[in-house]
Image: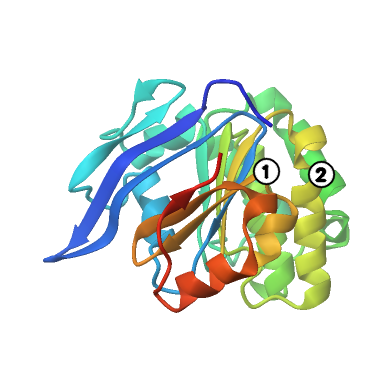
Amino acid sequence: MHTSDPVLSLENLTVAYGHANAITDVSLRVAPGETLALIGPNGAGKTTLLRSVMNQERKSSGRIRLCGRDVSTVRTARLVRAGIVHVPEGRHIVAPLTVQENLQLAAAAAHRCPRREIRESVAMVYELFSPLVRLRNKPAGLLSGGEQQMVAIGRALVARPIVLLLDEPSMGLAPVMVETIYTFLAQQRELLGGVAIILAEQSRIALDVADRAAVLSGGRVVFEGSSSELDDSTIAAAYLGKAQASVAD
């Protein structure tokens, strides 16, 4: 159980598209070294929520705090430099560049990794994702979906985040690649030294590596508590739009 002050807090966030709310009055927090699973069906608001953290969506109300500081209006590029890094759904890599060049570019662009340490950060990614070693000089656009996902997460890691947002990293991947990604996530506490992770997924696979879980249904948090306390009936109710809000002790 993580008892330290939250590194990231979402306070009563509401985002509307026209007259309809995509997310409504959502409050969540994640502590250093903690993984929070964000579970919900397609259209529940998971992607909107993560984009809101990066200030890529206009909020109707609510605040975002990073290490206690209100960053609700801070530009996305500055948030990255402050330590919030987002791996969006769809694996946004620079296709013509090699794996090595993708990693080096991300490290330099984030301005969080001193140039003299970029090589060390890139080496860490190869240690975490050993399948990339033999692919380091291959254009990233020619890799498989799972290999591209490893590059996308690697690009985030070389930016030295204190908060890592992952939007459905298992989507469209072969089971062996899902296992590779989730093996990394299970080991992240020891390997990454206290990075907080919000992990959005449609399925309960995220619960295997999460300390806590929140279930989104219709843009609202209908469950928040220990991942071990989240049962199948609550998830099923969220998918059927019948979930009732609850917060576990």
- Note whether 80 is above or below 24 in the view shown: above
Q: Residue at x 69, y 32 (%)?
A: 1
Question: In which image quadrant can residue 175 be found?
Answer: bottom right
- Disc number for residue 211: 1
The answer to which of 97 and 231 lies nearer the viewer is 231
Q: How many marks?
A: 2
Q: Position of residue 222 (x, y in %)?
A: 43, 57
Q: N-terminal of the two: label 1 or label 2?
A: 2
Separation (CA) of disc 1 from disc 2:
13 Å
The answer to which of 6 and 95 lies nearer the viewer is 6
Q: Mark 1 Cα within 10 Å, few/some/many (few <14, many 20+)?
A: some
**Residue type pointed to by label 2:** Gln
Q: Mark 2 Cα within 10 Å, few/some/many (few <14, many 20+)?
A: few
- Note whether 94 is above or below 59 in the view shown: below
Question: In which image quadrant can residue 179 be found?
Answer: bottom right
Q: Position of residue 138 (x, y in %)?
A: 75, 65
Q: Residue at x 39, y 44 (%)?
A: 53
Are the residues tagged 1 and 2 within 8 Å (C-beta)?
Answer: no
Give the quarter of the figure containing the C terminus: top right
Q: Position of residue 147 (x, y in %)?
A: 74, 66
Res 203 visible:
no
**Residue type pointed to by label 1:** Asp
In the displayed structure image, the side of residue 206 where residue 25 appears, left or right: left
Res 146 visible:
yes
Q: Residue at x 61, y 73 (%)?
A: 171
Residue at numbered disc 2: 187
Question: In which image quadrant can residue 16 be found?
Answer: bottom left
Q: Position of residue 112 (x, y in %)?
A: 56, 28
Q: Secondary structure at mark 2?
A: helix
Q: Secondary structure at mark 1?
A: loop
